Amino acid sequence: MKGIEERIDLVHRLIKVVFTNRDQLIETAVRDAGFTLRECRIEVDMNIDNLRGFDEMITVFSERQPICRPDQEVALLLPYNGSAWLNTAIISIFLVGNRVRVKFATRGSEISRFTESLFKPIFGDAICFEYTDGRSFLKNAMSNPNIPAICLFGSDDHALLYQNSVKKFGKKFIFEGPGKDPFIVLPGADVEAAAKELVFSKYIYAGQTCTAPERVYVHESLHDAFVERFVELSREVKTGDPSEPDTEMGPVASERAIANIKAQLKDAVDKGARIALGGRIDSHMVYPTVVVGASQDMLGMREETFGPVSFISTFKNAEEALRLARDNRYGLRASVYGDNKAVDFGNELVGKPYCHPVDKMVFGKFGTVGVNQGRSESWEKAFVSKPVGGYGFSGWIWETINDKFILKQGPKLLSLEMSR
């Protein structure tokens, strides 16, 4: 494997190729992933910025050794809800000296093949693409002695099935999973700023991101004003054909997500909540939906939604808000809006700066907490120089060190975890 300077040079070549093929990459992502033209433009441009950001990590990477021997490779299984940004995950593992075998979701096979056509002339067999189904890919990776490490983006239910195999074959297993992110509006918050941020982060990609806010907690003194403004802004979101330039939100791709949304809405109404906006689902188009009067026992407050639906609840004081925010098995990201006391509130929720060994799954902590800060800003340089990841069932690392099975949780860089 080439040295860090040579590997960085290859990434510089990739940047030029991505930029040259920007329009075709965007068109392919719209057609294949179903996200809007606007969203895919954001993705591709963010990816180019992220690839440039790796230059800042040269000194760090120069001191690292790959987790793989020259004849080995890392297995990387990626989700469908991404397009250009997936290059960041691939490149972060490659830059520390590993060969990478990558599997895009079956739904993303066209974007995968187009990405492969860009990568192959630059990286050769250092980065290989595979087109088997996901379960076969993981099964083969587990038993293959030339794959010491596996990184999976997906569902926690799926990832948990592999614990015994990870132990048996002595793999390092990094899992990046779902979120059920709380969005908390404290007294003193700028209602307009909070409502605008929730609209952006909730409806971009039709809510199909692990960091989309799903549980909304608003102080009772601000509830009515916040809901009124959030509903107004939600009504203005332009839905429709993803390929049209003025479309702001397209359809939901996953049949499973649509079925879950329908079940969550029925459950919420049956338990006394009210749909203040939306609730309409036409085939894969789930229109912006706002549910008020939500309670912790509702499916929409417990299970990942993965769609453009917000469940809103009230709280009386900061202590209650902390309890509600912590009351979930996922701990990826939290958003907090408020006055100067909001920083202290956020510090109560955030975990350690970097992943660390734990005796058991840690619940009630979050890998990233944004205080009066948009999702886009808090996610800048994710997987490049900013560690990301969560607690609870939002993500973990399994590995065996000196015959001892280790569990780690918290934010991480794939580059550091795939090197020594």
Image (tube, rainbow, N blue to C red):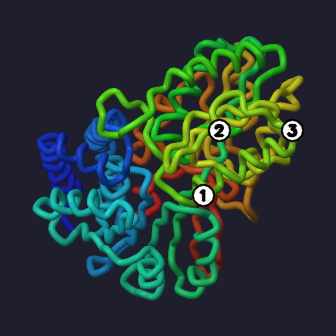
Quadrant where the C terminus lies? bottom left
> Do the CB atoms of the residues marked 2 and 3 lie less than 8 Å apart?
no
Residue holding disc 1:
395
Across and down, in percent, residue 201 comes to 53, 32
Q: Residue at x 53, y 41 (%)?
A: 207
| Label 2 residue SS | loop
Residues packed near mark 1 inside 10 Å, few (<14), some (14 to 19) or many (20 plus): many
Q: Residue at x 23, y 45 (%)?
A: 27
Residue 233 in sight from this viewpoint? yes
Q: Of the residues shown, which amino acid type is indicated by label 3?
A: Gly
**Which residue is located at x 72 percent, y 45 percent?**
265
Residue 347 visible: no
Residue 155: image x %, image y %?
58, 62
> x%, y% of residue 139?
47, 83
102, 404: nearer the viewer? 102
Residue, far front: 282
Quick one: SS at disc 3? loop
First in sequence: mark 2 vs mark 1: 2
Task: State which tag comes first along the sequence, 2 or 3.
Answer: 3
Q: What amino acid type is highlighted by mark number 2?
A: Gly
Q: Is 177 left or right of 324, judged from the image as shown?
A: left
- Closest to the camera, between mark 2 and mark 1, is 2
Q: Give left or right: position of 383 versus 316.
A: left
User: Mark 1 falls on what kind of element?
Assistant: strand
Instruction: Name the residue: 40% across, 50% down.
Output: 82
Q: Is 272 or 113 nearer to us in this picture?
A: 272
Q: Is residue 61 above or below residue 139?
A: above
Residue under label 3: 272
x and y percent of residue 404 in the render?
A: 65, 78
Drawn side of residue 331 relative to residue 36, left or right: right
Residue under numbered circle 2: 279
- In-front residue for pair 236/23: 236
